[in-house]
């Protein structure tokens, strides 16, 4: 089945609940139970590397558990509570109950959800490893323009879908 990351509509079936931000060092224990049934993954819509990584995650998501949203797309903040500025800094994973996490832990939570396995979150149970993964994520995020990517999502969609890039 082909998944369409380029959909312009934002699912609004569940109302946004009170947001709780989970740090990377808390992610291993916070999400230790069953993986979330679904998450919204909010990314930088003007980043080609980010679009490529979202496409890869969606490819392994065989049960449509991940909804990918560009942080700059109209309506994303209303359904996720993640601002465009926050999405420029890091990828965010938002669960239906309002828990959210950023960076390396968000990627691990996306993999956990897509695969239906808690294994990607295991390293986050150890604070020293969680901090190291955060540092690696920060380096990649800071250098993402150097990596090969796809056409940025917001550029592919055209005018009016996303707020202008700064």
Image: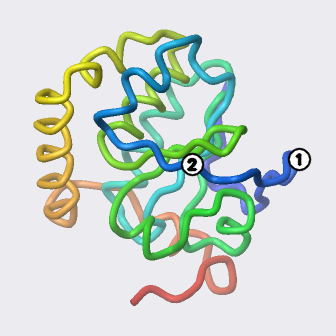
Q: Residue at x 66, y 57 (%)?
A: 80
Residue 20 image label: 2
Q: Residue at x 11, y 37 (%)?
A: 132
Q: Residue at x 52, y 89 (%)?
A: 164
The image quarter containing residue 159 is bottom right
From the viewer's side, name the closer residue of 155 and 112. 112
Query: What residue is pinned by disc 1?
Result: 13
Residue 68 image label: none
Q: How many marks?
A: 2
Tell me if mark 1 has few (under 14), some (14-19) or many (20+) residues whose alpha carbon lies within 10 angstroms of its own: few
The image quarter containing residue 26 is top left
Q: Earlier in the sequence, mark 2 or mark 1?
A: 1
Coloration of the structure image:
rainbow
Q: Residue at x 44, y 76 (%)?
A: 85
Q: Secondary structure at mark 1?
A: loop
| Residue 55 image point, x, y percent | 47, 42
Relative to 85, say whether 28 is above or below: above
| Residue 76 image point, x, y percent | 67, 65
| Residue 119 image point, x, y percent | 37, 10
| Residue 49 image point, x, y percent | 31, 55
Q: Secondary structure at mark 2?
A: strand
Q: Is residue 91 left or right of residue 25?
A: right
Tell me if mark 2 has few (under 14), some (14-19) or many (20+) residues whose alpha carbon lies within 10 angstroms of its own: few
């Amino acid at each position: 089945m082909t998944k369409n990351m380029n959909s312009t509509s934002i699912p609004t079936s569940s109302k946004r609940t009170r947001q709780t931000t989970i740090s990377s060092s808390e992610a291993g224990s916070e999400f230790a139970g069953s993986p979330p049934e679904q998450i919204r993954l909010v990314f930088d819509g003007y980043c080609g590397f980010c679009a490529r990584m979202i496409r890869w995650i969606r490819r392994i998501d065989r049960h449509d558990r991940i909804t990918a949203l560009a942080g700059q797309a109209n309506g994303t903040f209303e359904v996720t509570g993640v601002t465009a500025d926050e999405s420029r800094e890091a990828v965010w994973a938002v669960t239906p109950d309002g828990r959210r996490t950023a960076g390396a832990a968000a990627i691990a939570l996306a993999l956990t959800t897509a695969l239906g396995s808690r294994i990607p979150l295991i390293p986050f149970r150890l604070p020293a490893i969680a901090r190291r993964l955060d540092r690696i994520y920060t380096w990649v995020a800071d250098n993402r323009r150097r990596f090969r990517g796809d056409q940025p999502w917001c550029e592919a969609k055209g005018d009016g879908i996303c707020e202008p890039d700064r």
